[in-house]
Image: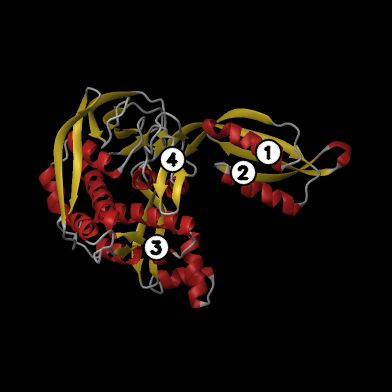
Amino acid sequence: MKTLHFDCFAGISGDMTLGACVDLGVDPDELRRELGKLALDGWKLEFARDERNGIRGVRAIVEDEHAREYGRHRREGGGHSRVHAHRSWKDIRALIAQSALREGAKKRALDMFTRLAEAESRVHGVAVDEVTFHEIGALDSIIDIAGTAVCLDILKPDKITSSAIELGGGTVQCAHGVLPVPAPATLVLCRGLPVKTGGFQKEMTTPTGAAILAASVDTFTETASFTEIKTAYGIGRRTLAKPNVLRLSLREEAAEAGGEWWNTEDLTLIETNIDDMTGEALGFLMERLFAAEALDVTFSPCTMKKSRPGVVVSVLCARQNLDALRRTLFRQSTAIGFREQTVRRLSLRRGMETSETAAGTVRRKRVFLGGEELRAKIEYEDRARVAREKNTSLDGAERSICGGK
């Protein structure tokens, strides 16, 4: 099985991903030709051999004519600029959807940018379609995301995996001032993903990098059995005490029995029995457990001491999130102890497809057994939105999305 592995020991950004893909073998000219199908001007994409701490790789450089013009006007106008504009997510979505990008790349790019826009929506408390990106930075993000989507479509791996994501440390300058790393949008995008902090005292994972991983990775793992085919490095902008690089590996993975058909993970199951919490309190507990990165939370009825009715609280999580969930259980529930065991989870591979319909942008979750697509389902949030807009049921909203079929 041909596997593409992201080793994010120094984080990830969009330009580092592009550099690593070119170092892995993507033709820069083919990439630029494909990006030229976007109705977008004022950009130039160059690649240069570079090194960080003795590790050689490729650095991607997006030249933004609008940014240069913005800087010139700031210098000449005392900090003000008439070219300081914004691009809305609605405009960017239309730009990508209506382009002549190859279909696989278009779907990937829309998925990545949808996740980025939704994260910004949550952080700033505005509707997704009202999210805007500053002109200075929006063009970089479009080239980084669309370019990465093109690269993945060219490489066509059977599976994409990643290490835990190094977020960095220290502080970062955001629209709302100086905040601790990770930036708010990065934190939203990494929800449910394995992360690490403190390896660097800089922001190492950008929102764009987090969106690429969230939309693309099938499995996050630190262990695997494989034959390395090729190793590549995307060079970051900073020169630090440790290498600021993204390592990208093309591997022939030796899967377990059935591994080519499904994902296999070792997770932790936490369970406790409770008989003295109200339904409201249990509902709030579930909310807090998911906020602490639980993968799944279920309540099952049981009979406890003295024939009292109770509930078994079951929490499934990745090992790196154990302590946060333990603290949440002790603080938010009446439990004074719980059981833990390692469990193996087998899950079908999933992919998210974003498409434009008569009812607006919708996402479909696609489920695969090996290379066979078993089923696809429109995301609940999109069906619910259409149902509210059209004052109909969820089934009616689905029929509307599917053109009345």
Q: Position of residue 126 (x, y in %)?
A: 46, 64
Q: Are marks 1 and 4 in contact (CB under 8 Å)?
A: no
Q: Label 3 to label 2, Cα distance in Å?
A: 28 Å
Q: For this view, does 24 lie left or right of residue 165?
A: left
Q: Label 3 to label 4, Cα distance in Å?
A: 24 Å
Q: Label 3 to label 1, Cα distance in Å?
A: 35 Å
Looking at the rendered structure, the kind of residue marked 4 is Thr
Q: Position of residue 209 (x, y in %)?
A: 34, 43
Q: Which residue is mark 2?
A: 289
Comparing labels 1 and 4, the label whose residue is closer to the camera:
4
Look at the image and tell me in which quarter the C terminus lies.
bottom left
Looking at the rendered structure, the kind of residue marked 2 is Leu
Residue 329 numbered tag: 1
Q: Which residue is mark 4?
A: 171
Q: Secondary structure at mark 2?
A: helix
Q: Residues within 10 Å of mark 4 (few under 14, many from 20)?
A: some
**Which residue is rendered at x = 56% and y = 30% of the image?**
343
Give the colour scheme of this rendering. secondary structure
Q: Label 2 to label 1, Cα distance in Å?
A: 8 Å
Q: Position of residue 62 (x, y in %)?
A: 19, 48
Circle nearer the N terminus (4, 2): 4
Q: Are marks 4 and 2 in contact (CB under 8 Å)?
A: no
Q: For this view, does 315 lie left or right of residue 52?
A: right
Q: Residues within 10 Å of mark 2 (few under 14, many from 20)?
A: many
Circle nearer the N terminus (1, 4): 4
Looking at the rendered structure, the kind of residue marked 1 is Leu
Q: Residues within 10 Å of mark 3 (few under 14, many from 20)?
A: many
